[in-house]
Amino acid sequence: MGTVFGKVRYWRTYFYRQGAGYYPLDVELGLTRDGFSMLLRSYATRMATKVSYAQVTLILSLFLHWTPAQESIEGMVLGLGRHTAAWFESAPAPEGDGEVLVIQIDGKATPTATEAELEKRRGKRAKNPRSQRHRGRAARQRRGSKRRRKKGDKAKNGKMATIVTMYTLRRSADGQLEGPINKKVYASYAPKRHAVAIARREANKRGFGPGSGKLIQIVTDGDNDLQRYIEELFPEAIHTIDVYHVTEYLWEAGRCLY
């Protein structure tokens, strides 16, 4: 069994019962079939949420002098990731919240393009006197037929995830708002409405439900879909557009004009 102290060998009895069996000692110790202790799984999966799998193996090898394989760490993350939705739903509301709830919702694409696809786009393009249609046909003939993609292997540059950041602000004695307090971040590849529904559920859990009379401030980048879902699920909230994105649009307009 792989632990934070290295590999530990132990013996246990196997019980066979009508088509299947089990190890009673493994059940008592709470061990999983992959042969790693829960403490090691906790360390590996927590680090995998911050750095890549390759970096996790490097860090573990530096401090523990051994490490599970990258495929094993990926399996740990995916296995525990199945229970994250239930954990978020059953987690209690944080204590000591403020009087104003701030919700920030935005989308971010994680890169999915392979190095081979990125390499085709880099570098200077050679001059070609032929038309664009003939240039494309010649390039396709030169590259040959495309390799069949596996399930989940996308050709796009990235896959969009929706990120929800929630925290509260507390009003001080002089009337100023102080925070952030009890900051929570949730991200999902599910549709945008799912992210807004999660924000609604967490807001209700923290005491900012409909009819509570408490102030909810929602900040987005002007996404029309998010605005529609916010009007549906947060009719009592104040919805504003992030000034930073507005500034980006103004600079883009200035570049087009000048």
Image (cartoon, helix red, strand yellow):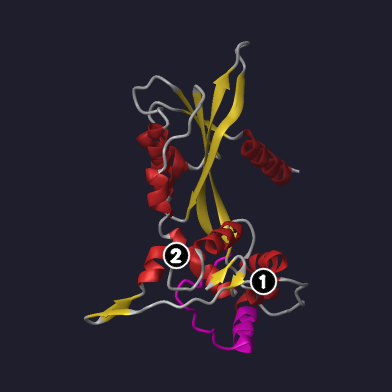
Residue 173 point in image, percent of width and height: 60, 11
Q: Name the residue under label 1.
A: 118
In this view, the residue in front, 11 or 43, is 11
Viewer-nearest residue: 189 or 72: 72
Q: Which residue is nearer to you in this view: 226 or 183?
A: 183
Q: Is mark 2 on a helix, strand or loop?
A: helix
Task: Pick whichever of labels 1 and 2 is earlier in the sequence.
Answer: 2
Toward which corner of the image does residue 66 lie, by quadrant?
bottom right
Q: In this view, does 49 lie above or below 252?
A: below
**Magenta span contains residue 142:** yes
Q: Which amino acid does label 1 sit on?
A: Leu
Q: Mark 2 points at which residue?
A: 79
Mark 1 lies on a secondary structure that is helix
**Which residue extends farthest top?**
174
Q: Identify which residue is drawn at 52% across, 73% down.
A: 1
Q: At x 40% / y 28%, what residue is drawn? A: 207
Place of residue 181 in the rendered image (x, y in percent of width and height, measured from the top left): 57, 30
Q: For the residues marked 1 and 2, what is the alpha-carbon distance in whole angstroms?
A: 31 Å
Left or right side of 58 for 235: left
Which numbered disc covers residue 208?
A: none
Q: What stretch is highlighted in magenta?
A: 134-158
| On screen, residue 152 above or below 241 | below
Side of 157 relative to 210 (left or right):
right
Q: Does the magenta stretch include residue 192?
A: no
